[in-house]
Amino acid sequence: MAVYCSASERIDPVHVQLAADVGALIAARGHSLVSGGGSVSMMGAVAKAVREGGGRTYGVIPRALLEKEVGDRYADELVVTDGMRERKGLMDDAADAFVVLPGGLGTLEELIEVWSSKALAMHAKPVVACDPTGVLDPLRQAVDTLVTSGFVQRAAADEVIWTRSAAEALDAVEAGLAAAAGAAAQPSEAVHTQEGLESGAPRDGDG
Ligand SMILES: CC(C)=CCNc1ncnc2c1ncn2[C@@H]1O[C@H](COP(=O)(O)O)[C@@H](O)[C@H]1O
């Protein structure tokens, strides 16, 4: 699974510990890590904990950030990309689920991307946020306001599962993976004939 989180060195250490707890559980429960390939702050803590627990880490980092985010030279596999878009694509493709911990603009950008693309049914991977300290609560409230005012559909807002602990986050990921596997095993009903498109329910907008 991919974990998106802070690369800042100026945060409360409680968040670095959260990242380590998530990493330890990823390994203990037999998952592997897809990360941004940095070794600083929460990014570094999650990768280190996964490896200490015997799990595999795959990191993807743009060349321009190798120095700033200190490329994770202990990663089982570290891919250096030419740019950010390539990094994002490789991470998203390699992940079976997305876990988002507190972070800054980079983390928010990734959260919104996997959240909105899930709402558009462009992927069916679980998106789980883990925010024990509530620093992302204002974001949830902002999205709720957008729902109330009609800009975002309630179903789209609900595509993120919000959790308050590492264990809750891993439980939610595993429940989401099991549900996705169950859905994939069902015969597909997604065959749209011209008639079906014309007579079907109105298609929702992009909000
Ligand atoms: C060109 C392009 C697609 C830009 C969109 N912007 C971003 N997309 C994806 N990851 C990012 C972006 N900006 C920063 N990041 C990365 O997100 C990680 C966390 O950053 P932050 O501490 O949450 O701040 C860092 O590894 C940082 O390099």
Image (cartoon, rainbow, N blue to C red):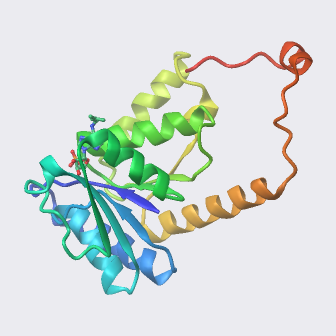
Residue 129 x/y as whole percent: 44, 52
Name the residue nearer the viewer: 136 or 111. 111
Residue 40 drawn above or below residue 28: above
Residue 80 drawn above or below residue 50: above
Q: Is residue 136 among the parts visible in the rendering?
A: no
Q: How many marks?
A: 0
Residue 74 drawn above or below residue 114: below
Quadrant in which residue 156 is drawn: top right
Task: Tell me if 12 is positioned left or right of 51 in this view.
Answer: left
Residue 22 drawn above or below residue 64: below
Q: Residue at x 34, y 37 (%)?
A: 138
Q: Is residue 201 among the parts visible in the rendering?
A: yes
Quadrant in which residue 105 is drawn: top left
Q: Residue at x 61, y 30 (%)?
A: 154
Residue 76 x/y as whole percent: 32, 76
Q: Residue at x 55, y 62 (%)?
A: 173
